[in-house]
Image: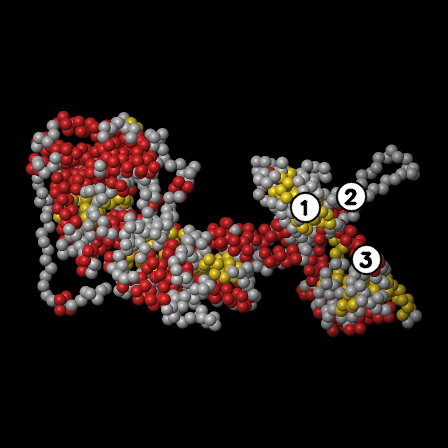
Amino acid sequence: MATPVIMPRQGNTVESCIITKWNKQVGDQVAVGDILFAYETDKASFEEEAKVAGTMLQIFFAEGDDVPCLTNVCVIGNAGESFAEFAPAGAEPAPAPAEAAPVQAADAAPAEEIAETPVVMGSMKISPRARALAEKSGADLSKVTATGPDGRVIARDVQKLIDAGLLVTAAARGAYQGGLTGTGIGGRVSLNDLKAKPAEEAAATPAEAPAAAVELGAPVDDSYTEPMTNMRKVIAKAMMTSLSTMAQLTHNISYDATEVQNARKLFKEKGEKFGMERISINDIIMYVVARTLAMPEHKALNANLIDDGKTMKYFKGVHLGMAVDTDRGLMVPTIFNADKMTLKQLSAQAKKLAKECKEGKISPDYLKGASFTVSNIGSLGIESFTPVVNPPQTGILGVCAITDGVRVVNGEIQVYPKMTLSLSYDHRAMDGTPASKFLVDLKNNLEAFTLMLARG
Amino acid sequence: MSKQLYVDPNVVRAPGKITFEDIPVNTYQKKVKDEIGNFTTEEFKNIYRDMLVLREFETMIQLIKTTSEYCGVPYTHPGPAHLGIGQEANAVGEAFCLDVEDMIFGSHRSHCDILAKGLSAIEKLDDEKLLDIMKSFLDGKTYAVAEKEPHETVKDLAINFLLYGAMAEIFARETGFNRGLGGSMHTFFTPFGIYPNNAIVGGSGTIAMGAALYKKINRKSGIVVANLGDGSLGRGPVLEALNMSAMGQINELWGDDMKGGLPLMFNIINNMYGMGGQTVGETMGYDAPARMGAGFTPSQMHAERVDGWNPLAVIDAYKRKKKLLQEGKGPCLLDVVTYRMSGHSPSDSSSYRTKEEIEAWWEQDPIVEYRKQLIEAGVATDEECDAIVKSVKDAILRNFKLAIDDEVSPRMNLDKNPDELADMMFTNGHVESFAPDVKPDVNMPMEECPRVQAIAKKERWGFDANGKPVSKNKVYQLRDGLFEAIIDRYYKDATLAGWGEDVRDWGGAFAVYRGLTEALPYHRLFNSPISESAIVGGAVGYAMAGGRALVELMYCDFLACAGDEVFNQMAKWQAMSADIIKMPVVLRVSVGSKYGAQHSQDWSALVTHIPGLKAAFPATPYDAKGLMAAALSGTDPVVFFESQRIYDVGEQFHEGGVPAEYYEIPFGKADIKRPGKDITILSFGAVLYRALKAADELKAKYGMEAEVIDARSLVPFDYETVLESVKKTGRLVIVTDACERGSFASEVARQITEMGFDYLDAAPTVVASRNWITPAHELEESFFPQPSWILDAIDAKIVPLPGHTRVTNQTLNEKLRNERRGV
C-alpha cells in the first residue's frame, strides 16, 4: 500500500522546515532505514529515515522548498500504485497537533500541486511569472523594488528578494501584511513574527481584578510567564551583544538650549509659509550632530568597528540612525547623508522614515547602513541615561529633556534652559579625550545654532 | 508567353471581321413515337421511372419542409432544401448518356442531378461491381440499411442504397453518403461519378474544369459535366472557367498526344431565375445563355439551346456533344431550358413571378407529357405507368422512414465524440505518387536539367571557410530549395501538374521554376490566364478527380481574387466529404514588398482563420525545401507562403548546408534558430532576419540572450516549443510582417497568454506592421517592423532596457488613440 511521508514537526514552535537534500528520487528503491531526505529548521539539521520499504512513487517538494510541518512530502509504495490522493492539498496555516494523522486530500479532488499562498501586497502590479515565483518561494513582496515597465514587479525583482533572503514562511503568508523583519528559518517572516504584535497588545491589557477572596497580605504566587515576541528577542539579542562585545561607556555634558529653543519657537510661529513649522528640537539636534560628526577629527565616531574589532570602517557621509519607538518595538531607520541636508530636508526625511516605521512600510534598505545613532527620550522627561551602542557603530548620542538649569553669571544666579547630552561610545574605537572633544564641539555648535544654520 | 507563338503585327492589324455561326435553338422536336427503335422499351420506361423518382424525392422534401410530414409520417427538416421540381428531364436526359467514369459537378440544387446520375450508373454497372461499391463504402454502414429493404435484384437494392444514402445525407445522418457532414447542398457519391455539389453559386465551374484537366493530363477517358444554373453565369469564377477551359495552348502548344480541347461540358440548367432575379431581361443581357459560348472560342463551345423539358431532346444533345468532347473538340456549352416550379427554397413565396406563369409551366409538366407520349407510342400502358408510380412512391416512403429513424440512421454525436469530425479536418496522408504505375512525363533526365546542373555548382552553406557570407551568385538560395523539392516530386508523381501566371518560360515571377520549362512538358506546367479563381478552383477539381496539383498566386494580395476557391473549396471538401475526397493541393503564395498597398500584404491570418487549411511560411533554404517536400507528399491542402524579400538568402542555420538528398520537414514543428535564456522572439517568415538583428543588439548592448524561434508552419502550429521557451524566459515578443490587427501573431500571443500565464513576466507583445496601407517602397521602413521596433516594444512593455532610446511611440495613450480611430 502506498504510504505518504510527512514533514516531521521538530518541536512545537516549528511551523515548517526546508528540504536541503533529497537522497532518493522518484523510481528509486527504498529500504527501511534509508535516508530519504535532509531538512533543517533555523536551529538544526535533520535527516528523515524511511519507515517503510518500497519504491519512491512521488516527491511533492523540491530541494530548497519550505514545507509546512505534517505535510506530505513524498509517497513510498509499489510501482504503479496511485499516489494522487496523497498530494498535499495546500499549506495549512493553522498548526495541527503533533499526533495528527498525515494531512490527506479529499479523494474526489486530488490536487495536482500544492496550493501556495502568495504574499499579496494590495494592488501591487506584478507579472504572473513574478507572482508565481513569489508564491513558490514565499518572497516578501512588501519589500520588493519594482523594475519592470510602469512600475510592474517582474521576476528579477522577486529573485532579488529571494537572493537577499527576504522570505515569508508558507504558514505565515496568508495573514502577513508586510513590513516585518523575519526571525524564522533563514530570516523568514514566520507565524511567530505575526503573533508578536497581538501578544504585545495582550500583555498591555490589564488582567481582570482577582477575586477578593484571598486575604490581603497572605503569601501568594501570582506570577505568570509569557514568551517574548520575536522582535523583542531580536532586540534583546542585539542589546546583549552590544554590552557583551564592546567596551562601551558614557560621557554626559549639558548645554544652554536657549538658541535651540528660540529657533524652534521661530519655526513654529513663523515657519509655516516656508513649510518649516514642524521642525522639532530633535531635528535641530540631529542637524547639528550630523555637521559636528562630519568634522574630520570626529571620524572615529562616524564609523563602524568591524572584523571582530580589528578594522575601522569610515563613512564619507554621515548616515544618521534615528531611534523610533513603534508598536512593534524599537526601530532605527537611517537618514543617509544627513550632513549634506538642509535642516528642512533633514526634518522631512526624519518624519517620513518615522512614519514608515510606525506603519510597517519601511524598506529594509533604510533599516541598515547607519554610521551613528541619535536616541531621544527627552520628551519623557529623562534627564540623563546610558544609551546602548548599536553594533557595529562606535557611538550613540542620547538626547535628554530640557530642564531649568542654574548657573552663576557675574556673581548672579541665572536660570537657563539646560539639556543633557549622553554619548555612549566604544572605547576600542577611540579614547575618552576625542569622545569628550566631540561632546564639547557639539555643545558649542548647539549653543551657536544660528551660526551653524547660517554656515549651512 | 511563348516564343513559339509569333505576334505578327501584319496579321493583328489587318482589317477583316469576326464571324459567328448560328446558335441552334430547340432544334430537336421529336416525341417518343419518333424514337421507337432508337431506345429499348425498358430504356423508355426507365426514363419515366427516373423522372418520377426525382419528382417524388423532391416532393417528399417539399412536403416535410412545408407541412412537416410526408404520407402521414411526421418529420421536421431544419436544413436547407433547394429543390429541382421541373428540372427532372434535364437531369435524366443528361445522365442517360453519361457513363460511370463521367463526372458531374453540381450546385446547391442538385438532388435531381445526383439521383439521375446514380440511377444511370446503377443501370450501367454490373451486379458484382455494384455490390463491391456498396459494401465497401463507409465500412458498409449505408449498405447495411439498404440491404434489409425488400428487393428482387441487385439493381433494386442499389436504387434503395442510392435513395437511402442521399436522404440520410440530407437529414445529416451518419449513414448518409458523407456521414451527414455535407447535407442537402453537397450530397455526392464519387463511385457513381457524382462529384461534389457546391453551395457557392458557380463554385463548380472552376472545379469541374480542374477535373477535366485531370482527365486530359492523365489521359483518363470520360467527360466532365458542370451543372450550373443560369444565375451562375454572372459569377466571375464561372467566366474564368469558361475562358481557361478554352485556352488556346492545349491545341497550340501542348504535346501532340495532349492536343484537343478539354472534355468539359458546361451544362447551364436554365431555369430562368437566379434566386428571384430573372436572368433574361433583368439581371443579364445575354438574352440566352447559349450566346455565351460564342464569346470564348471560335468553336462557340458548340453551344446550343435545348428543350430541357423533353428528356429525349436532352439525350439527343448529349449524344452529339459527348462525341465532340471525346473527339477533343471541347469544351461545350448547353443552354438547357427548364423551369423551377418549386421555389428557390421552401420559404420562397414566389413574389417575383406570377401565378399564371407558374400554372402555364405546370400545364406542360414534362413528366405528365412524357407519360402521354409513352402511352401514345404504345411503349407502356396506363396501368404499367401507374405501377411505376406506385413502386416509386413506395420506395421513397420506405427509404424516408429509414432515413429519419434515429435508431437506424443515427447522427454523429459530436459532443461525445468530437474527434469524429476533428479527425476529418485533415487526412494527414503520405503519398509518393497518385499514379504509382505511371511513369511521369518529363523532357529529360533530371540531372540534365540546366537548373539542376547550375544548382550543383552552388554553395549549399551560406558561409565560406572564413565565416564570410557566400556571394548571392554562388550561394544556394531559398528559391533553389523550393525548386529541388518541386522537381523531385514532378519526377516521382506522374499526376503532379502545376499552373499559374507566368510559371512557364518566365520561370515564375520570382524564378523559382526556372529550369522546369526545359524539364517538363507543357501539360505538366503551364501558364494560366490571369484568373486566380480558376487557378485555385482548377487545382481543387484536379485533386478531387485524383491528382496532385501545385498552383501559385503571384502575390498574396491576389488571395482576395481566389477567396472562394481557397476558403470555401480547398479548405472544406475533405471534411465535407467525410474524407472520401483528398485535397493534395499546394498553393504557393508569394508575399511581396516594395510594390505598395496591393502587392505587399501578408495575409497569413486569413488562411489560418479558415479551418481545413495547412499553412507554412519558411524563412530559410533548408526549411523551404523540407517543408515543400512535406507539402508535396501529403494529402492535405497547403497554403505555402513565401516571402519575396528572401528568395535569394543562403542557408545560415542548418550546419553543413542544405542537403542535396530528399528530406521532409514535418508541419507543426517550429525551429529554434538561436537559443537563449532571457527573452523569446517568435518570428513568422522573412522577419526572422530582422528578429535576429534585434537579438544581436540585445546581446551587444544589454547582455540579454534572446531565443529566436522560427514558426516555420502556422497550421498546425507548434505551441509546445514556444511554451517551453516562454517557461524558460518568461518573455515573448512575436514579430510578423502582417498588419497587427487580427494577425496570426496576435492569435499566438493570446494563446500563449492563456497557456503560459503563470510563466509570463509580461504580456506577450506583438511587433507587426502598422494598420495602414503599405506605403511606397521608399517609406516601407516606417511600415514594416524593424529591429529597433522590437527593442522598443521590449523596453516599453517587457523589461526596461537601460539607456535605450525608443524610435516608436509605445505608450498606452498612443495605442488607445490609434484604436479609437481604427488604425
Q: Whole-percent x and y of residue A136?
A: 62, 50
Instruction: Find disc 1 in the rendering and name its residue.
Output: A36
Q: Indicate which label's residue lies in the foreground, 1 or 2.
A: 1
Give me the chain letter of mark 1: A
Q: Which residue is mark 2?
A: A205
Three-letter code, disc 2: Thr
The residue positioned 22% from the left and 44% from the top of the image is: B101
- Which residue bears the numbered disc 3? A241
Q: Label 1 vs label 2: CA separation? A: 48 Å
Residue lying at the far left of the rendered structure: B34
Residue located at (17% from left, 40% from top): B96
Label 2 Cα neighbours within 10 Å, binned few <14 / some 14-19 / many ≥20: few
Residue A169 is at least partly visible in this image = no
The N terminus of chain B appears in which quarter of the rendering?
bottom left
Q: Which quarter of the figure has residue A364?
A: bottom right
**Mark in front: 3 vs 2:** 3
Q: Chain of mark 2?
A: A
